[in-house]
């Protein structure tokens, strides 16, 4: 906490809390209500964080006078205890209201980023443990965390270490975000994407490669001794870099060789497997062709046999039909001959009868 022996409370009639918050660099602190500190429930777990807890609490609540607390160690412990109590108080309803007034009056400062245009900031701690880190400022517009500006004072009296010496645990990691969630009307619009600063040289944008080359090149000092030491250091760095590069190149070459061998081996295995697959496919195709030929030959033989049987049956049927036709013709011829002979006999009988009749008529006529 921002306290030293020069900022002792000796000789001051004001309450200890007002004296503490009035120290240079303590502008971010608000005055914790006495009733909140007197409630033992709010102090649960803090007894083990500081030594002489009861004495420190009596000093904060003015139960003992400043003349009774000349021990700087006790005052330092009291400052630490007040910071832990303050971190719990500012996330309560009354504490948020007290911090709201400070935020509205920009007592926490403004964002150092030009694009934020004087956006008020909030104190924040990066850790909740005492002694881990100092307090920082959080900008709700650009969502970035910055170091607070140093406090300038005309005299070192009551100067302390400024805001940079205030422990971040006195504000905690929760406060700024809970504050903005409680007072949502204070949340500013985020920065537009095209608001980022673009470095230019003679009106032209600086390429990233130029920055990399510039960062890789060391600055040469103006003094000769500094130049000699810089050149020596540079030579040592270059030698170390060359050694690293050579070892890296060697390892890289070994890796490349191993990779090439592995690639060749995999290619050979792939070629062998492809050739084997091709042979297997060719053999399978040959088997299928042979089987298809055998099947077709068998089918052809069966077809020929069936065809020969059908043709022989057709021949037999034609021969039988021819025989039947010939026998029919013969029967017809016989029937025709018989009918002709019958007709001839009848005609002959008729002719004989006619002749007899004509002979009888002639005989009658003659008589």
Image (cartoon, rainbow, N blue to C red):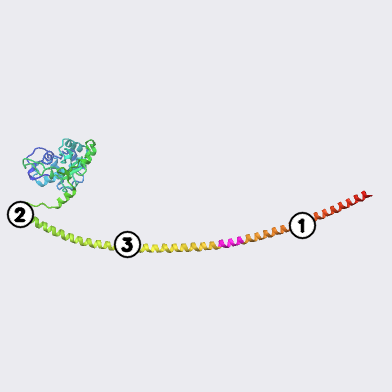
Residue, far left: 224
Question: Are the residues tagged 3 and 1 within 8 Å (C-beta)?
Answer: no
The residue at the point 52 percent across, 63 percent down is 297
- Queried whether the magenta region covers residue 306, the answer comes back as yes
Dominant SS type (magenta): helix
Residue 201 vertical position relative to residue 247 in the rendered view, above or below: above
Q: Residue 245's x, y, as percent?
A: 18, 59
Q: Is residue 252 visible?
A: yes
Question: Are the residues tagged 2 and 3 within 8 Å (C-beta)?
Answer: no
Query: How many residues crowd mark 1 within 10 Å: few (<14), some (14–19), many (20+)?
Result: few
> Sequence order check: which comes first, mark 2 or mark 3?
2
Highlighted range, magenta: 302-311
Q: Residue 211's x, y, as percent?
A: 16, 49
Mark toward the viewer: 2 or 1: 1
Q: Is residue 127 left or right of residue 330?
A: left
Q: Residue 120's x, y, as percent?
A: 17, 38
Labelled disc at residue 224: 2
SS state under label 3: helix
The residue at the point 53 percent across, 63 percent down is 298
The residue at the point 30 percent across, 63 percent down is 264
SS state under label 1: helix
Disc 1: which residue: 337
Q: Is residue 367 left or right of residue 169?
A: right
SS state under label 2: helix
Labelled disc at residue 115: none
């Amino acid at each position: 906490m921002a306290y030293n022996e020069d900022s002792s409370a000796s000789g001051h009639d004001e309450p200890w809390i007002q004296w503490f918050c009035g120290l240079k660099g303590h502008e971010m602190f608000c005055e914790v209500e006495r009733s909140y500190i007197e409630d033992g429930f709010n102090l649960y777990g803090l007894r083990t964080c500081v030594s002489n807890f009861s004495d420190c609490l009596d000093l904060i609540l003015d139960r003992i006078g400043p003349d009774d607390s000349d021990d700087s160690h006790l005052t330092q412990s009291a400052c630490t205890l007040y910071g832990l109590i303050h971190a719990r108080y500012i996330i309560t309803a009354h504490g948020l209201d007290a911090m709201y007034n400070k935020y509205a009056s920009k007592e926490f400062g403004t964002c150092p980023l030009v694009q934020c245009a004087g956006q008020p900031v909030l104190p924040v701690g990066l850790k909740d443990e005492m002694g881990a880190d100092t307090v920082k400022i959080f900008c709700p517009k650009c969502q970035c965390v910055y170091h607070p500006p140093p406090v300038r004072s005309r005299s070192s009296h009551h100067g302390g270490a400024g805001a940079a010496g205030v422990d971040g645990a006195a504000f905690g990691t929760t406060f700024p975000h809970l504050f903005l969630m409680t007072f949502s009307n204070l949340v500013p619009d985020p920065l537009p994407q095209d608001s980022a600063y673009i470095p230019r040289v003679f009106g032209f944008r600086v390429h990233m490669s130029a920055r990399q080359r510039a960062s890789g090149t060391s600055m040469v000092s103006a003094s000769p001794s500094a130049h000699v030491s810089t050149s020596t250091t540079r030579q040592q760095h270059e030698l170390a870099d060359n050694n690293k590069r050579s070892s890296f190149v060697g390892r890289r070459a070994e890796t490349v060789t191993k990779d090439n061998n592995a690639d060749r081996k995999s290619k050979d295995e792939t070629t062998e497997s492809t050739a084997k697959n091709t042979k297997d496919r060719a053999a399978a195709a040959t088997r299928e062709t042979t089987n298809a030929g055998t099947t077709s030959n068998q089918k052809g033989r069966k077809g020929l046999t069936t065809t020969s049987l059908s043709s022989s049956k057709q021949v037999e049927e034609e021969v039988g039909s021819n025989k039947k036709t010939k026998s029919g013709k013969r029967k017809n011829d016989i029937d025709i001959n018989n009918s002709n002979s019958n007709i001839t006999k009848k005609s002959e009988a008729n002719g004989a009868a006619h002749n007899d009749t004509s002979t009888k008529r002639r005989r009658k006529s003659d008589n």
